[in-house]
Amino acid sequence: MTQTLFISKHPIVATKVSQLRDVSQSPKQVRQLVNELSNLLGYEASANLATVSKKSLMSPYEAYESTDLKERIALVPVLRSGLGLVDGFLELFPEAPVFHLGLFREKVSLQPVEYYNKLPHNPNVDICFVLDPIIATGNTAVATINILKECGIPGSHIRFVSILASQQGVTQLQKVHPDVTLHLGAVDETLDAHGYIRPGVGDAGDRLFSTAL
């Protein structure tokens, strides 16, 4: 790990990633596991957020100063599989705006193609959590961050959260965007010729939404 790369060491995360790999899990079980992992990874990825005291409140016994998050938080799920991570993060940040960004990986070139963009022209946020269950080749992650930076969000304000990444994808992303922090549940070494992580978890979108052929 480095100052911008955090791979979870939590035993519950490791257990749930192992369960997610199991091909026998139903779409309902996959969705539940992804939601739970999202919440766990969100907890770890937000551990160093700044806080501020905004007002004086009363406990059952006496007055105390409130503790609130200082930074304005936004969520950017990468469609479609990134949607599976949204609810877990909204449990932590219920007031955060959700900016949807749609990219798909072209099957021959393995390069990302943008097809949907609901990012505001002037994002008024301090920390942006990008949500995508998988970093395979790293091309989609790089393209996503390119788009966010073009919208005016500095790399230092972007935290990319994934359940699983390939080592090649991590290397690619850190090479192009060394200022972006990565929070990962696990890393697999092997990426096959078709751009799939091995052993991996399969196609996250197909497993979440039961669309595998």
Image (cartoon, helix red, strand yellow):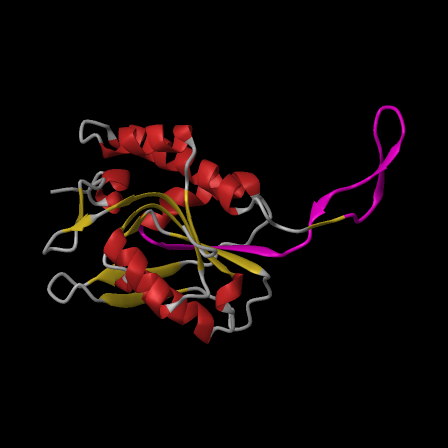
Q: Position of residue 34 (x, y in %)?
A: 36, 37
* Residue 138 sits in quarter: bottom left
The quadrant of the picture occupied by the C terminus is top left
Which residue occupies the foreground of this view, 161 or 28? 161
Is residue 168 shown above or below 186?
below
Give the percent coordinates (x, y) of residue 193. 9, 56
Taking depth in this image into account, of 28 and 204 the one nearest to the observer is 204
Q: Nearer the viewer, residue 118 or 177?
A: 177
Residue appearing at x 68%, y 53% in the figure: 70
**Residue 81, image x and y in percent?**
31, 48
How many numbered discs, if any? Answer: 0
Q: Quadrant of residue 137?
A: bottom left
Q: Residue at x 90, y 29 (%)?
A: 62
Q: Note whether 118 is above or below 55 in the view shown.
A: below
Given residues 23 and 172, the one toward you in this image is: 172
Q: Quadrant of residue 26?
A: top left
Identify the residue at the far front of this view.
2
Residue drawn at point x = 39 percent, y = 33 percent: 13
Q: Is residue 109 left or right of residue 100?
A: left
Q: Residue furthest top?
A: 60
Left or right position of 83 against 94:
left
Image-based side of 52 in relation to 124, left or right: right
Can residue 190 be seen? yes
Q: Which residues are magenta?
A: 53-80
Q: Is residue 160 among what the camera can see?
A: no
Side (left or right) of 108 relative to 60: left
Q: x, y percentage for residue 43? A: 52, 40
Q: Is residue 25 above or below residue 172?
A: above
Residue 67 is a magenta residue: yes
Residue 4 shown in magenta = no
Residue at x-position 23% and y-position 28%: 25
158 w.r.t. 20: above or below: below
